[in-house]
Amino acid sequence: MLGYPYFDQFAALLRRKNSLVRNRAISILAANARWDTDRKFDALLDEFLSHVTDIKPITARQCVAALPEIAAARPELLPRIRAALEQADLSGYPDSMQPLVLKDIVAALQIMDGTQR
């Protein structure tokens, strides 16, 4: 666990009420996925993926944008990541935000498929 000694503390930040704190946690956890030799991200993945449809659309967009980095570092998680993106219910967002989040989801899927770099 030398590469990510604060992983658990950052993971706890995903549950914070403040969306800015959740955004930071998403970015930090995604960046640390490459050092996850202990497979800690496996247990956290469902909670992480719940932010694909976070109450705040900007946090959802941050989460979606981070997923290709996680998939690149941990390709065995790709099926679960893909399923979360493909099944995301965006109906809770205002009409002005739904197309933006959907565009991010499509872009993330394309990156993970290797069709866009």
Image (cartoon, grey):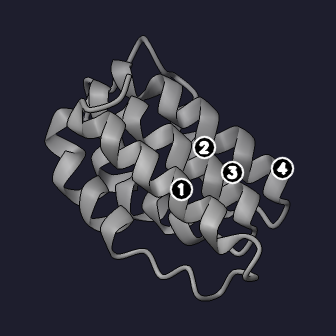
Residue behind mark 3: 13
Left of 107 or right of it: where is 77? Answer: left
Cα gap from disc 3 to disc 4, whole angstroms? 10 Å
User: What amino acid type should be assigned to the residue bearing mark 3?
Assistant: Leu
Residue behind mark 2: 26
Q: Nearer the viewer, mark 2 or mark 3?
A: 2
Task: Give the answer, above or below, for where 22 lies relative to 18.
Answer: above
Tell me what residue is drawn at x 36 percent, y 21 percent. Answer: 34
Tell me what residue is drawn at x 81 percent, y 67 percent. Answer: 17
Q: Nearer the viewer, mark 1 or mark 3?
A: 1
Cα gap from disc 4 to disc 2, whole angstroms? 10 Å
Q: Position of residue 56 (x, y in %)?
A: 75, 68
Q: Point out the tag, 3 or 4, that comes first from the N-terminus.
A: 3
Q: Point out the tag, 4 or 2, that comes first from the N-terminus.
A: 4
Cα gap from disc 2 to disc 3, whole angstroms? 9 Å
Tell me what residue is drawn at x 54 percent, y 42 percent. Answer: 65
Q: Nearer the viewer, mark 3 or mark 4?
A: 4
Q: Position of residue 3 (x, y in %)?
A: 44, 13
Q: 10 Å neighbourhood of mark 4: few (<14), some, or many (≥20)?
A: few
User: What amino acid type should be assigned to the residue bearing mark 4?
Assistant: Leu
Asked whether 70 or 97 is in front, the reply is: 97
User: What amino acid type should be assigned to the residue bearing mark 2?
Assistant: Ile
> On residue 111, which mark appears?
none
Residue behind mark 4: 20
Tell me what residue is drawn at x 68 percent, y 51 percent. Answer: 13
Badge 1 marks a residue whose secondary structure is: helix
The answer to whether marks 2 and 1 mark residues whose Cβ atoms lie closer than 8 Å is no
